[in-house]
Amino acid sequence: MGSYLIRRFLLMALTLFGMSVLIFVMLRLVPGNVADILVDSAGIADPKEKAKIAKELGLDRPIHEQYVSWIGGLARGDLGFAYISERPAIEEIAPRIPISAKLAGLALFFSVIMGVPLGVISAVRQNTALDYSLRLVSLSGLSLPSFWLGLLILMASVQWFGMIPIWTNEPRSILEELMLLSIPAAAVGFRSSALIMRLTRSSMLEVLRQDYIRTARSKGASQTTVNYVHALRNALLPVVTIIGIEAAFLVGGLIVTETVFNIPGVARFLVEAILWRDYPIVQNLVMLIAFVVVMVNFLVDMAYMALDPRIKFAD
Amino acid sequence: MRIRLAFIAGGLAAAVVIAAPAFAQKQGGTLRVSHRDNPPSASVHEEATISVNMPFMSVFNNLVMFDPKEKINSPDKIVPELAESWSWNADKTKLTFKLRSGVKWHDGKPFSSKDVKCTWDALSGIDEKQQIIRKNPRKVWYKNVKEITTNGDNEVTFTLAREQPSFLSMLAAGYSPVYPCHVDSRTMRSKPIGTGPFKVTDFKRNEAIKLVRNPDYWKKGRPYLDAIEFKIVPNRSTRVLGFVAGEFDLTFDSDITFPLLKDVKGQKADAICEARPTNVHTNLLINRDAPPFDNPKLREALVYSLDRQPFSDILSQGNDLRGATMLPPPAGVWGMTQDELQKLPGFGPDIGKNREIARGIMKELGYGPDKPLKIKVATRNIAIYRDPAVILIDQLKQIYIEAELEPIDTTIWYNKIQQKNYQVGLNLTGAGLDDPDGVFYENFYSTSDRNYTAYKNPEIDKMIDEQSAMTDVNKRKAMVTKIEQALLKDGARPPISHSVSNTCWAPAVKNLVLQHNSIYNGWRLEDVWLDR
């Protein structure tokens, strides 16, 4: 196990290094840099102005020098200066991370808390009216884009309650924050919950037909014990995998949800930074996302071991 | 008719607002405004977008400004601001301002003539080492400035190379605030220091721009508001719903299109909405330096191909205005009347006849139904650009041109145009002020940094300089019309339509006067108050 973990961590480091090169190169392959954009935003067509800004931002240095400077800074915890706001990148990024983390966490919580139990119910009540209804709900969850659902929620709130649950001011309490984030979290988590529910259902149906389930039943175990202790635990392996993947995909969902609900999170900020080619912000944020995805994958693999004792990671 | 009704309604609304008795004015409150996007920076001098002017104009003062109580900006409606008075010398080449004393910058430092000098030394390029700006999009506005001299702390003189009646108008525009000499450009872009009625407390990207009342404002008793908060809400549906739900008191300038206006009025019956021209016009960019449009006949065919009414009908339910480069009356001071416009090539009412002329030219050049000219129409990949481009493509089919839409990422749009890497482009051009010097110098003068099509025509340059020096308004107006005709004949940014859009506010917002010939002026907001 020890050497597996070392190997795994080394692989993670290698993956992150690869990502850093990829992000760095890809960003510079995209047409237009921040100097172009800053000058363009004022509708000026003066190459001298562009060159002046490019020099000021260090964009005229050789690309490898720029990369070493970024990675070196990152290793020292210095994320550089945001080109647009002209403030330290860390000051721009840090306050936004908790907002998106809470939103993503709530969305994931919502999707698991809805998806897994409803999937189990749907499986054990297979081909009943309840099963059909739940499958319909899950289908709608898969087909409704979260931005559309979000707008629908906003319109309904204005129409029926005369208020709009969008972020216009910093919430004054945890409760207020929870209230403010729960609706967008539900909007973004609805799709994931539908996916998790469908996967839980099919996985449960497969497990419920296994011999060891029949054995458990013949030994006199109650239906609840059979469903939740014997079947669910074994059915959860593919579900955990999909939860891991969905956690990574949530960032994509957050972009539109943060825009519709006007949440000043990291996902919307990233899109804005990409549009402005604000390299220090984009590079560091994408690295952060890459790190989160790599860690989630690692945790999913560890969860396999916890869920199924037969799984061992060879040294 | 509908346009006239919209203006009358707007006028009446404003008349009611202006007529509000003085004793009713209340001090205090926070004005909550929705903002459409992240301003590129807070430095008014460095940018060319309403996204910057609307939130940051109230941080500054000009030497003079267009009377904020008047809806139409015109040279005879200029009032003093940081200047108490001004005078011209006999040959009108020296303009001297007597400055207010006792004015302080938001950081407590005293304002003086040195600040005026250093601002325009930087803007006119006399002193390129000035650190108060990094970009200078309107340098061409001040090309006629020879020298700026101070006489003590309270007097400053601009010496011009020649007479220029519009010079004062340019100083009165929202784009002409006085900057402090002692503050660097980085600070001005992030948390600017001004002398204006409001101070910047916070400018957080993707969140908000917060301004608070300047307690030391030189105009006693102003501003009425305690604070203004511009909330950055990039999604238009969310912004509109937020206004309907009462989350905002004022919408972003011209944010409410005519189709949206119906929704807003349907859901918030007490909303006050005013339609006004934005002085932003849709036009064609034609690459005259590369085939096939290096042929003037082909450019002429394009000019004759346009049917402007469908653009207005489809995009603004018929409310957009037909005009040439200058905004047409009644809001526009210098534009041509509808009768005059009819005489311009391609503006005549008989579209069939115009297109017959265009088809004739195309046939002459060897094109026809069996041999159409295949081109690409480039435009910024934003709905307000793409939508008219699609209508244009449809109209071009009528004259044997098969066009394909080429949406360009907005971040590289000017770059592409500047590099002449296009055939035909669909573009929007905004005018910082309704004045021929501002519009012509900026967009068509060969040495302008904002002339991104690199249009070069010595004849036009000469005419622009000539009208700029004219003191007789009628003669100048005739010259402006001549320039417009020449530009159109040359296929230089043929205009399609001038946009009209709505700005809405809650009934509690009082004394808001929108200016009808430039959206970039009139956002000082010192006279606005809240009745709640």
Image: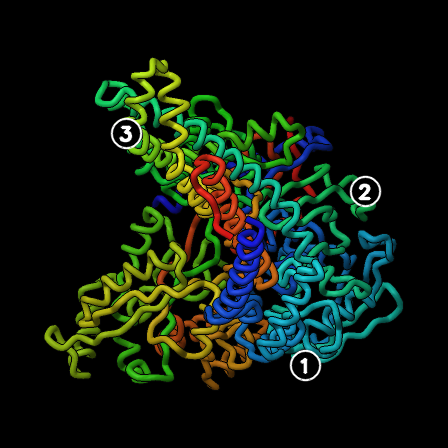
Looking at the image, residue A22 sits to the left or right of residue B158; the answer is left
Q: Residue at x 70, y 60 (%)?
A: A78
- Residue B278 in the image: state x and y as whole percent: 48, 53
Q: Amino acid at mark 1?
A: Ala
Q: Secondary structure at mark 3?
A: loop
Above or below, B491 against B339 in this view is below
- Residue A246 in the image: state x and y as whole percent: 43, 42
Q: Between marks 3 and 2, how big is the CA–CA gap?
A: 78 Å
Q: Residue at x 39, y 18 (%)?
A: A225
Q: Which residue corresponds to mark 3?
A: A210
The chain under label 1 reads B
**Residue B131 vs residue A6, the one in the foreground:** A6
**Residue B453 vs residue A100, the one in the foreground:** A100
Q: Residues within 10 Å of mark 2 (few under 14, many from 20)?
A: some
- N-terminal of the two: label 2 or label 1? 1
Above or below, B446 against B391 in this view is below
- Circles 3 and 2 in contact, beta carbons < 8 Å: no
Q: Amino acid at mark 2?
A: Pro
Above or below, A216 against B46 in this view is above
Looking at the image, residue B126 sits to the left or right of residue B470; the answer is right
**Residue B475 vs residue B413, the one in the foreground:** B413
Residue A36 marker: none
Q: Between marks 2 and 1, how big is the CA–CA gap?
A: 40 Å
Q: Which residue corresponds to mark 1?
A: B161
Say if residue B180 shows up in the picture. yes
Dividing the image into 4 quarters, which one contains the N terminus of chain B? top left
Q: Which residue corresponds to mark 2?
A: B215
